[in-house]
Image (tube, grey):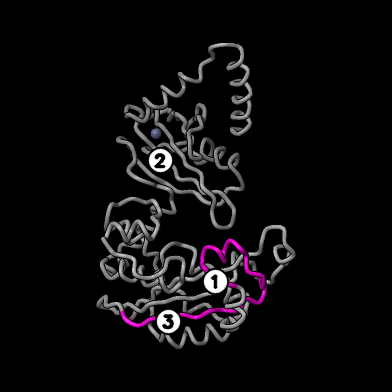
Amino acid sequence: MNYIVLDMEWNQPWPGSPSSKKVLPVQIRGEIIQIGAVRVTEDQQVADEFQIMVKPKYYRHLNRRVSKLTGIKEARLKEEGVPFPSAMEQFRAWCGEDIVFLTWGFDDIGILRENLQLFGLETGWTEKWYNAQMIFNAQTDGSTAQKALKTAMEMFEIEATRPAHDALGDAYHTALICAKLDLKRGAAEYDQALKSHENGFHGAELPGCICRQVYYDFADKREALSAMSGEENRCPVCEARMLGSRWFAQPGHRYMDMATCPEHGKFLIRVRLSEQQNGLIRVSRLTYEATSEAAEAYARRAEKADPEDQRTTRRRRRRKAAVENVKE
Ligand SMILES: [Zn+2]
């Protein structure tokens, strides 16, 4: 087995240009114009390299921002670029069989697959991949923030010897980082790390957290919050339906509510809404003991919402009406 560290540059139509109005048979976030890859062997030796320029077929005019960032000129693309299907043929031949892709970030593999689909090519060979950022975070500071490649290089004291925003340059630097990670362990722990990232459980929860749940596929915020204070509002002890009181908005698409089980008393509910890839809404839900710090936070927030003068009262009434609608 070999790891293939992959980095790509892609072109996007200039907003409002004729290209941007094109309807393609497969929606793509960008058309690949450069592929860089470095092989890292199973025992984590940085090995051979691959680079190819791809002549765009759909977005032929090079976006000047892309050009500025990558240093790629339209003339060079025309001269050196090969059509995508033939570039893929060469790339796959170089990759060989039994490969696992490593990328810095979540975008590259998705964009590669979109481009393959657009050209009617097979995508199965891209199935195994890891976002090296996630492994890096898990094995360094444990943060969930997506770090720039440059930041990660600094943390590992790797000096830049290749150009940045060049597909092969970035792939090479990523490979140097990957060689210093425990890739086997990273892969084994990856699914758990990814799940927790996707579920939106960023960082440690406050003390007193009893359970974490994730709910998917709500049409919008209203439907999500309505379910959270309605049919999904279950007591963590007996699973009976709890009665919500009122959602308070917090920064970062977060809301909290104090819920009551007739039998087991009060629980603080904190939810975070995020958009799924299909545009629907996912809810990460944390349930806390009402005696905890989190419950005190709720009390403070509720106190703050108390009317002080006419203006805040009016504003509050409107907000309250909206919340009541949500609960219907
Ligand atoms: Zn209960």
Most extreme residue toward the top, as rendered?
309
Q: What residue did someone put label 3 on?
A: 50
Quarter where residue 319 is shown: top right
Name the one closer to the observer, 267 or 26: 26
* Marks 1 and 2, the one that precedes in the sequence: 1
Q: Quadrant of ligand 1?
A: top left
Q: Residues within 10 Å of mark 1 (few under 14, many from 20)?
A: some
Would you name the residue on which mark 2 appears?
A: 286
| Placement of the N terminus among the 4 image quadrants | bottom left
Residue lying at 42% horizontally and 81% vertically, measured from the top left: 50
Q: Earlier in the sequence, mark 3 or mark 2?
A: 3
Q: Position of residue 276 (x, y in %)?
A: 54, 54
Kind of residue at disc 3: Phe
Please tell me which residue is depicted at 51% across the width and 49% down the height of the picture: 282
Ligand 1 within 8 angstroms of badge 2 C-beta: no
Does 312 sit above or below residue 61? Answer: above
Magenta residue check for 66: yes
Which contiguous range is marked in magenta? 47-73
Disc number for residue 72: 1
How would you rate the neighbour count of disc 3 (Cα within 10 Å): few for under 14, some for 14-19, many for 20 or more? some
Q: Secondary structure at mark 3?
A: strand
* Horizontal relation, residue 276 to residue 295: left or right: right
Q: Label 2 crowding class (10 Å Cα cut-off): few <14, some 14-19, many 20+?
A: many
Q: Residue at x 40, y 57 (%)?
A: 148
